[in-house]
Amino acid sequence: MIVVAGSVSQKLASRLAKELKSELIIPETKRFPDGEIYIRLPGEVKQKHVLVVQSTCAPQNDNLMELLFMLDLTKNLGARKVTAVVPYLAYARQDKRFKPGEAVSIKTVSKLIARAGADELITVDVHESKSKRDFSIPLRNLTAMPLLGICLKKMKLKNPVVLGGDQGSENRAQIVASKMGADADYLEKRRLTPTKVVMTPKSLDVRGRDVVIVDDIISTGGTVVEATKILKRQGARKVYAACTHAVLAGGAEKNLAAAGVVKIIATDTIEKKVSLVSVAPLIAHSLG
Ligand code: R5P
């Protein structure tokens, strides 16, 4: 196997190559004066199984284009099999037509990845597990939740409770909690009036306890900020936010800190300061 490192996933690609004891190729990339991307692969991939590792985080379209160039290039240079490893898959949230006339963006992205030369796609905690139906190539959707749980366990939190940001995240919270030996619950939204909604843990009392809010993505941080304010009012001791994808758009980090989140624990699907957990062993394991 050969690992090709996309420009935004270089640390993860190098960790993955180490896990797999494989060769790592770092493509030569540059920008033309008009903004177009140039890519050259300084290595031999003929007859090899090539893993092209590139998240499609911001700037999504540039990173997607670079991924497509690398997939097409490796196939064109004679790779026997090309696996697209896209730990953070952009546009996954637009997986249906919410309003008439909208683009189902993930379907377009999936067609591009397959047509560019990928024989299969590996991703992590893709927003909707239903996304499989949008792909014409095999899709492996891995979950980083057990790894987040293992990391959190080492932090020795006080009488911890793990909360999913909503009912859809309950399962994620349970996986994390089981690795920590902690309780799990989720935040339930209750509508008090047509304009007033409150969020509260479905059944557990958080008073005096450390709370971990778990989600697949922290994007603007709005969900976690709201939840944190409520949990603090309910007497939570310390609030932590754990997620797979630290999108952290705009002033998310600042807003989370201001709301009372003491620490963000994320993976390296998007390489940030808060990427305390690597998904490299997870991806390596899935490749068997
Ligand atoms: C929603 O379904 C997702 O699981 C996340 O809760 C959401 O994308 C987080 O977004 P934000 O950080 O902007 O509230």
Image: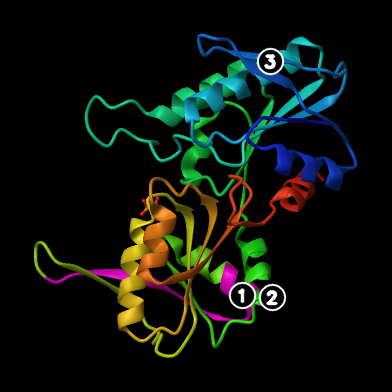
Q: Is residue 43 above or below residue 285?
A: above
Q: Measuring 66% from the left and 30% from the top, which residue is drawn there?
A: 7
Give the CA separation, mark 3 to mark 2: 41 Å
Q: Nearer the viewer, residue 172 or 154?
A: 154
Q: Is mark 1 within 8 Å of ligand 1?
A: no
Q: Measuring 47% from the left and 86% from the top, which residue is drawn there?
A: 209
Disc 1 marks which amino acid? Ser
Give the magenta range.
176-192
Return the residue found at the far bottom.
Answer: 208
Percent coordinates x, y for residue 157 in the rendering: 58, 82
Q: Nearer the viewer, residue 73 or 105?
A: 73
Which residue has dot 1 on it?
178
Secondary structure beneath label 1: helix
Q: Is residue 166 visible?
A: no
Which residue has dot 3 on it?
39
Name the N-terminal-most of marks 3 and 2.
3
Disc 2 marks which amino acid? Lys
Question: Does the magenta-highlighted stretch encompass residue 72?
Answer: no
Q: Is 252 displayed left or right of 72 in the figure?
A: left
Which residue has dot 2 on it?
154
Q: Is 31 displayed left or right of 246 in the figure?
A: right
The quarter of the rendered structure image containing the N terminus is top right
Dividing the picture into quadrants, the one containing residue 82 is top right
